[in-house]
Amino acid sequence: MGIKVSAVGHALGERVLTNHELAQHIDTSHEWILERTGITQRYISDHKNTSDLGTQALKNACERYNLDPQSIDAIIVATMTPDHFTPSTASLIQAKMGLNPLKIMAFDVNVACSGFVVGLDLASALLESKRFKRIAIIGAEVFSKILDWNDRTTCILFGDGAGAMIIDYDESAPPCVCVNHSEGDLDGTLRACGVPLLQEDARPLILSMQGKDVYRFAVDVIPSVMQECAQKAKLTLESLDHVILHQANQRIMDYAMKRLNLDLSKSISNIAKVGNTSAASIPLAISMALLDGSLHHGESVMVVGFGGGLSYGAASFTL
């Protein structure tokens, strides 16, 4: 049994923020950011929240593929910037889409930048149970709301956006093979928000990240989890048509591909134009690549997530 990708869509924050504009407010430059990250600009959502962008992305997917949204059985939203702790962002998207509450399940997963891969893993398992026929997995973030805009090590990296993928149960389709891991003892490497137990622990709801530690973690686990996923799927990495890594940093992506001796042309990247959109980055990259022709349905792909937790995972499937 496998999955069929029935629709893909995306949405972006309404305002473009370039490196040159950032350099007017913090001690940085376009050249400094580009050299270290590969980013030239990112999108900022001034007036929309995560559920708004997620709804836009899901609507975009349905419209692009002429798919009836009422046919969706479940919504899984991967985000670390939800509208609220509760209700779930997925529930808000269900309501904004006008989907029948008696015929749909909706919930969130928070695995930071690995969230979409975990969501895909869960969705595949739910489809395999045959209780569901069509599931929407949405990665959506408004990181601009939790950034310290005076910290040049983090505010240069992130952007706001959402990506949606709708998958169906299909007995004749190739399987979706997933692996996911967690290293919670490295939790202090990347954190955001939180509810303090004691008042003296209270802190601003901003992102903190140990960038060098994240880099070392990523370049170590990306090759290993890709090889693990390929072995489980009984394929070779060289046989894949494309690889879509979490769009964290162009240097990380290039280094990981080189360590695996994979052609850089197989790596899909949109980080230059949208920055790091966390859980949204993989479906957003897929959606944009399908539109510009660098990806096509029917191609074999592996997606790889890594980030807060620390967490990491990979999934191999046919687009």
Image: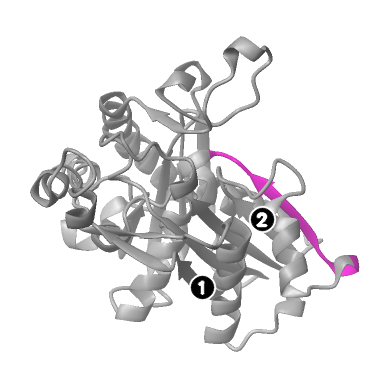
Q: Quadrant of residue 160?
A: bottom left
Q: Amino acid at mark 2?
A: Ile
Task: Decide which of tag 1 and tag 2 comes sooner along the chain.
Answer: 1
Q: Which residue is mark 1?
A: 8
| Image quarter in which the N terminus is found | bottom right
Of 172 and 79, which appears nearest the observer? 79
Q: Quadrant of residue 202?
A: top right
Query: Which numbered dot is residue 76?
Result: 2
Q: Position of residue 97 (x, y in %)?
A: 72, 73
Query: Which numbered dot is residue 202?
Result: none
SS class of the residue under badge 2? strand
Left or right of 141 in this view: 216: left
| Image quarter in which the C terminus is found | bottom left
> Which residues fall within the magenta stretch?
102-111
- Label 1, residues with CA under 10 Å away: few <14, some 14-19, many ≥20: many
Of 132 and 166, which appears nearest the observer? 166
Q: Is residue 223 above or below residue 108?
A: above
The CA distance from mark 1 to mark 2 is 14 Å
Left or right of 215 in this view: 230: right
